[in-house]
Image: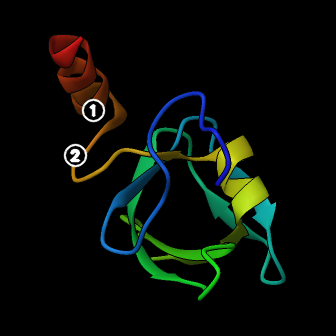
Amino acid sequence: MMDFPVGEPPAKGLRAWTPEGLKAHGVNKTHIPAQTGGSIIFQGEERDIFGVQWDTGKITVHSICEFATNLVCIGTHQTLDEYLMQEGEER
């Protein structure tokens, strides 16, 4: 499994966050605004692909490399700030 600089390894049922947003992502050229969260709604059998339903209602699909580069898994938190606050308290 890949190391994630911030966040935890993604898994179905957890939340994802896009700090910088997504522009023209995938076949449907989906745009997701910066600072948007979403739920990971599926993962491939090898945990190499993930689907995210964003809070905007749009759905995008990401390889593990794309996820590690563009997204952050924030566990069950609603925002990246909430996730980082909890992580800071645990250290």
Residue neighbourhood size for the residue with mark 1, other residues' Cα within 10 Å, grouped as few (<14), some (14–19), many (≥20): some
- Alpha carbon distance from label 2 to label 1: 6 Å
In this rendering, position of residue 76 left or right of residue 64: left
- Residue 10 placement (x, y as % from top left): 48, 59
Residue 84 to residue 46: above or below: above
Above or below — where is 68 with respect to 55? above
Determine contact: label 2, label 1, CB under 8 Å. yes
The residue positioned 15% from the left and 13% from the top of the image is 89
x and y percent of residue 88 in the render? 25, 13
In the image shown, does 47 or 76 lie closer to the viewer? Answer: 47
Return the disc, 2 or 1, that comes first in the chain's sequence: 2
Mark 2 element type: loop
Q: 10 Å neighbourhood of mark 2: few (<14), some, or many (≥20)? A: some
- Residue linked to disc 2: 77
Residue under label 1:
83
Q: Which kind of residue does numbered mark 1 sit on?
A: Tyr
| Residue at the image position 59 percent from the left and 74 percent from the top | 50
